[in-house]
Amino acid sequence: MTGNRRTSLLVSALLTVSLVGILPGAVHLISASESSAYPVLNVGDSWRFSYAAGENSVETIARSESCGSLQCVVDAEVSAQWSDVVWRLPDWTIVKENYTDPTGSYFDTYSPPVRSYDWPLATGKQWTINSTITEVSKDSSGTHYSTFMLLRTRQVASETSITVPAGTFNTFVVEEYKQGSLHTRRWLSYQAKDIVRWEQYGSSGQITDSSVLQSYKFLNDTPLPDGTSTNKILGLSPITIFEVIG
């Protein structure tokens, strides 16, 4: 869920960074509209992405831990140049985020937590992200403290089938607007439990960065909304999946 950073709200607000997710050639059978609940993220799930600039990353649901009185999953995306760790509630709401690159580290707390998606998704649905970010950043000059607003509008523009290196997926196309202009577009798949394609746009509407899902694996066999097994749809047992991914 990240640069795609499925979540990369901090980077969207502050700087432009390329980001990127894992199981090639899979067959996917359920239409996007048949899924009503949010995809369940399990510890051990992982995705591999490639970015337009040639960068690659691996995203993993690393562990589960408490976020105060709530329970979060820790969603970590890592490349050779940066790491982005996001604490999410089960419905993908973002509580806090820690981004690190060669320039330093940026730890953000969101108040209220950021609702990434308004489940269940449906064409035409629109929602607003309006949160105060409290940030602690560290770089060569020391530790810095700041507070600023994050304001975005997201909407489900359409449902469409898209083919990427990981396979062909039925997706919801989620557009994000910043100050009235299209900022990002995400192709979200319930089957992959992540964004299978992501694009970022400049002020003139040109694509400034993009990523695609290369492959993925689910550690646990999570039933899909129709009751079928994820691993059966992929045509692989859990052991075979690990052998394919490596």
Image (spheres, rainbow, N blue to C red):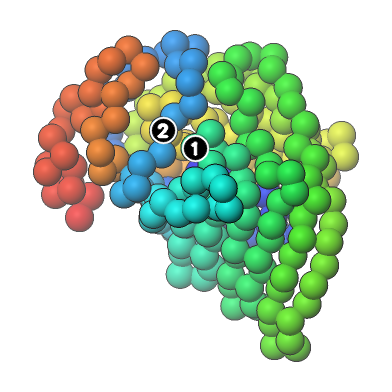
Amino acid type, label 1: Pro
* Residue at 25% in and 17% down: 228
Question: Which is more N-terminal, label 2 or label 1?
Answer: 2
Instruction: Say if 223 sits above or below 71 in the image.
Output: above
Q: How many marks?
A: 2
Which residue is at a point 70% across and 88% down the rendered structure image?
140
The residue lying toward the viewer, choosing from 198 and 90, is 90
Label disc, if present, on residue 90 of the rendered structure: 1
- Dot 1 and dot 2 residues touching (CB under 8 Å): yes
Of the residues shown, which amino acid type is indicated by label 2?
Val
**Res 71 seen here:** yes
Residue 166, x across and y down, in percent = 35, 37
Q: Nearer the viewer, residue 162 or 231?
A: 231
Q: Is residue 220 left or right of residue 158?
A: left
State the residue in front, 221 or 71.
71
Place of residue 114 in the rendered image (x, y in percent of width and height, measured from the top left): 68, 42
Q: Is residue 146 above or below residue 54?
A: below
Per the image, the residue denoted by label 2 is: 40
Asked whether, in this view, residue 188 is left or right of residue 236, the answer is right
Residue 179: give x, y in percent of width and height: 87, 40
Q: Is residue 127 above or below residue 108?
A: above
